[in-house]
Image (cartoon, rainbow, N blue to C red):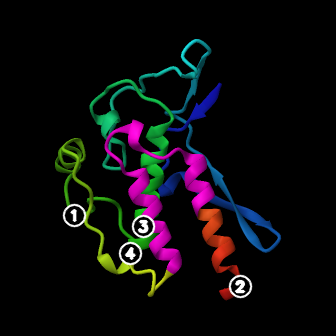
């Protein structure tokens, strides 16, 4: 079985201390969390429903109120990367209803191309790459969180000598 948070916005993350000079991040606010069951026959997690989704920080499938899986949190992880890069929430300039319509239509927030420039910043460019892989409209096309972590760890190893 696995936990799905379904509300991984920046306000759900807190810094809880330091270990080896690095902050320890803690995820909180589990009011929408679910435990997904594993289907032995299909070899995959069972889909679930989380009720009506509010806000502009959710995945398309949450707004469509279709069956959910662990990829809802992956989409939100992409939103967190967006906030980290830009300092803004996705669709910050729209009201919630208009933002939801755009997300359901497969539209993504504007991101300046400067973040894609590996010559400018390898770290920002890799964050963009991971964000875009997290933002795939169809959950089947999205990377899983383990691949996102692997790509980010790879970037840390590639750049650690330059920090």
Q: Quadrant of the N terminus?
A: top right
Label 4: which secondary element: helix
Instruction: Give the Cα separation between the discs numbered 3 and 1.
Output: 21 Å
Say whether marks 4 and 3 touch (CB < 8 Å).
yes
Pointer 3 with pointer 1, Cβ within 8 A? no
Q: Residue at x 45, y 80 (%)?
A: 118
- Magenta span: predominant SS is helix
Query: Sequence-wise, which precedes: disc 4 or disc 3?
Result: 4
Tell me: residue 147, above or below residue 45: below
Quarter of the view holding residue 115: bottom left
Q: Which residue is mark 4?
A: 116
Q: Which residues are magenta?
A: 122-151
Q: Could you tell me residue 101's position as x and y percent?
A: 18, 44
Q: Label 2: which residue?
A: 161
Task: Identify the residue shown where x is 53% and y is 44%.
Answer: 144
Mark 3 or 2 closer to N-term? 3
Quickly name the residue at label 1. Answer: 93
- For the residue pair 100 and 46, the one nearer the viewer reads as 46
> Label 4 vs label 2: CA separation?
21 Å
Q: Please name the residue that numbered disc 3 is placed on.
A: 128
In the image, is residue 61 part of the stretch drawn in magenta?
no
Q: Position of residue 129 (x, y in %)?
A: 44, 64
Q: Earlier in the sequence, mark 3 or mark 1?
A: 1
Q: Secondary structure at mark 2?
A: helix
In this rendering, the answer to whether 70 lies above or below 43 is: below
Q: Residue 102: x and y, percent?
A: 19, 49
Between disc 1 and disc 4, whose residue precedes?
A: 1
């Amino acid at each position: 079985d696995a936990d799905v948070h379904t509300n991984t916005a920046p306000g759900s993350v807190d810094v809880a201390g330091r270990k080896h000079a690095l902050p320890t991040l803690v995820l909180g606010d589990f009011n929408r969390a679910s435990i997904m069951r594993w289907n032995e026959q299909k070899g995959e997690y069972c889909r679930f429903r989380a009720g009506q989704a509010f806000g502009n920080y959710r995945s398309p499938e949450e707004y469509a109120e279709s069956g959910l899986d662990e990829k809802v949190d992956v989409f939100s992880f992409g939103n967190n990367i967006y906030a980290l890069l830009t300092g803004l929430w996705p669709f910050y300039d729209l009201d919630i209803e208009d933002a939801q319509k755009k997300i359901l239509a497969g539209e993504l927030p504007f991101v300046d191309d400067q973040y894609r420039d590996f010559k400018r910043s390898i770290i920002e460019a890799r964050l963009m790459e991971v964000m875009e892989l997290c933002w795939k409209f169809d959950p089947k096309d999205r990377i899983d969180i383990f691949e996102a972590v692997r790509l980010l760890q790879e970037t840390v190893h590639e750049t650690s000598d330059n920090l």
